[in-house]
Image: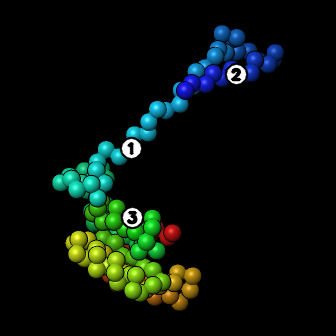
Amino acid sequence: MSQTLVPPPPSPSSSSSPTLYSKLKIRQPTSIRPVRSQPMLHSGSNSSPVDNPRWSLRGMTALVTGGTRGIGHAIVEELVGLGARVHTCCRNGSELDGCLREWDSLGFGVTGSVCDVSVRAQREELMGTVSSVFDGKLNILVNK
């Protein structure tokens, strides 16, 4: 479906030529194509984005809060797929244990902590844990 838009006429004080104003046709996209040129982690392909140095996060460390469900879970897996070492946290210990077991069975090597990031003392303890796990180096923080 196309739509025709007509810009307003130039103001009398404008020095632009009237020939610059014409009818513009704007076409709506017929389909949306993904921007990603490499397959996602879950595609089952032998190739991964980590093979492309442009997208590699090899050697990087990441902390993802709330990484056991929803978009946080997807972010953890995507960061691992790009080569990062990831630590995550959530408030529910059994939920965290289940995700860590799943990731371990997939060979992801994700670590995790039970933490309520709204409590200052627990945040400070989390940062001590992360510092210990990553030898004091944190490159990426995803706080969702």
Check disc 2 and report the residue beneath it: 7
Give how far across and how far down residue 44 sits, in percent.
22, 56
Mark 2 or mark 3: name the one nearer the start of the chain.
2
Determine the CA span between mark 2 and mark 3. 44 Å
Give how far across and how far down residue 8 sits, in percent.
74, 21
Determine the CA span between mark 3 and mark 1. 17 Å
Mark 3 or mark 1: name the one nearer the start of the chain.
1
Look at the image and tell me in which quarter the N terminus lies.
Answer: top right
Give how far across and how far down residue 74 sits, in percent.
39, 64
- Say above or below: 134 vs 28: below
Instruction: Give the number of the mark in front: 2 or 3.
Output: 3
- Say above or below: 24 vs 137: above
Residue at the (53%, 89%) spot, across then down: 121
For the residue pair 77 and 59, the one nearer the viewer reads as 77
Residue at the (57%, 82%) spot, across then down: 118
Of helix, strand and loop, which one carries label 2? loop
- Say above or below: 101 vs 44: below
Q: Quadrant of residue 5?
A: top right
- Say above or below: 118 vs 61: below
Identified by mark 3, the residue type is Ala
Determine the CA span between mark 2 and mark 1. 32 Å
For the residue pair 42 and 36, the one nearer the viewer reads as 42
**Labels 2 & 3 near each other (Cβ < 8 A):** no
Of helix, strand and loop, which one carries label 3? helix
Q: Is residue 128 visible?
A: no
Residue 62, disc: none
In this picture, residue 19 sits left or right of residue 95: right
Mark 2 or mark 1: name the one nearer the start of the chain.
2
Check disc 3 and report the residue beneath it: 74
Identified by mark 2, the residue type is Pro
